Image (cartoon, rainbow, N blue to C red):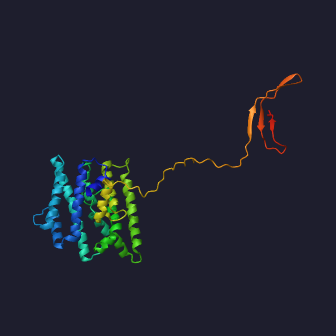
Amino acid sequence: YCYFAVSACCCLPHDSIIRLIVAKAAILITVADDFYDMEGSITELEALTEAVQRWDGQNLRSHSKTIFDTLDDLVTKTAATYHLQQEQTRFLKEFRDIWRETFLSWMTEKTWSDTGYLPSMEEYLETGMVSIAAHTLVLPASRFLCQKLPVEEFKPGKYRDITKLLMASTRLVNDTQSYQKEQADGKMNMVTLHLNENPEADIDDSVAYVKHILDEKTKEFLQIVLEDSSSDMPKSFRHLHLSCMKVFQMFFNSTNLYDSKEDLIDNIKKAIHIPPDYTQTPDHRVKPLPMPSSAPPEKKNVVKIAARFEPNIKVKYRGGKAMFTGQQLLIKNPISVCGSGAVCVPPRF
């Protein structure tokens, strides 16, 4: 489904390597994030986080070892795709730093949850916009679209505004739909934190507050994406960010689809091989006119007047001049109080 999502929201070529990079990273993020949220013990998670920071997984066991080995294989093969050895080394460090930041944010949220610590909304968003891992999807893949962007813009804490706005917006769009599930799981959420800081508000007020922040950040994000004339960023770089935003909106805009296996499969079926069902849609086509009836028309008492023009040209002489009376209208059987017959009505000129 991760590959389907990036393919459906991105106009890249069908055989683009970027789709594979984003899809593989999305699968790994899903598995690792769930491991930090539910499966792993605090000891396992601390060991995995330290291993990622060192980038050395020799002492790991079980699921932690599997996750690290998969991560190392993904990052190494992604960097090896570049032809120049100098670029491979530089990009390998970039990719590792981005993943280090992401794993560290997952560990921070796990520690908050286990200790019962309640961060402020600003502190939560600062960590949450990293843990949502939207930049972990976009930035490594964008290197295949624009390799000449400065190295500093790929370092944690120095991302461009378009990347920061993407990170914040995707976190907020997730929180507006998943706060009930995360509250039941003991996880923090922007909506529940606002409710905790504002006891006089209800849940609808908190959701509206977070959606307002989301709308403002989305407007800023779209303004940067759509600026062609004044932007120094390549168009492909901006549009890859926009595609990532579309994916998250598809998952979380109306409901939390990403946590429902049935909804995900249903979406794929609808997009690929289930034909549209038009049986319930109203018929807006123009209906044809009714055919004329074959029965003889009903007789009605209608007054008819039969008339025709008859040439009745006469020549009269008055004062030595010839005058033509022209045609005359002959009416047969006119209705008249004076009787019936034919009446000649001379035309007037």
Q: Residue furthest right?
A: 319
Q: Residue furthest left?
A: 58
The percent position of residue 91, horizontal first and vertical second, equals: 20, 53
Quarter of the figure that contains the N terminus: bottom left
* Relative depth, front residue between 247 and 238: 247
* Relative depth, front residue between 324 and 102: 324
The percent position of residue 136, horizontal first and vertical second, equals: 25, 58
Question: In percent of the image, x 52 and y 48: which residue is there?
Answer: 288
User: Which of the 4 quarters of the picture holds residue 173?
Assistant: bottom left
Q: Image height check: is 13 above or below 204?
A: above
User: Which of the 4 quarters of the picture holds residue 259?
Assistant: bottom left
Q: Image height check: is 33 above or below 86?
A: below
Question: In percent of the image, x 10 and y 64: which residue is there?
Answer: 58
**In this view of the protein, can residue 115 be seen by the observer?**
yes
The percent position of residue 283, horizontal first and vertical second, equals: 47, 54
User: Which of the 4 quarters of the picture holds residue 105?
Assistant: bottom left
Question: In percent of the image, x 19 and y 58: which residue is there?
Answer: 96
Q: Image height check: is 262 above or below 231?
A: below
Answer with left or right where residue 226 lies relative to residue 288.
Answer: left
The percent position of residue 24, horizontal first and vertical second, equals: 22, 57
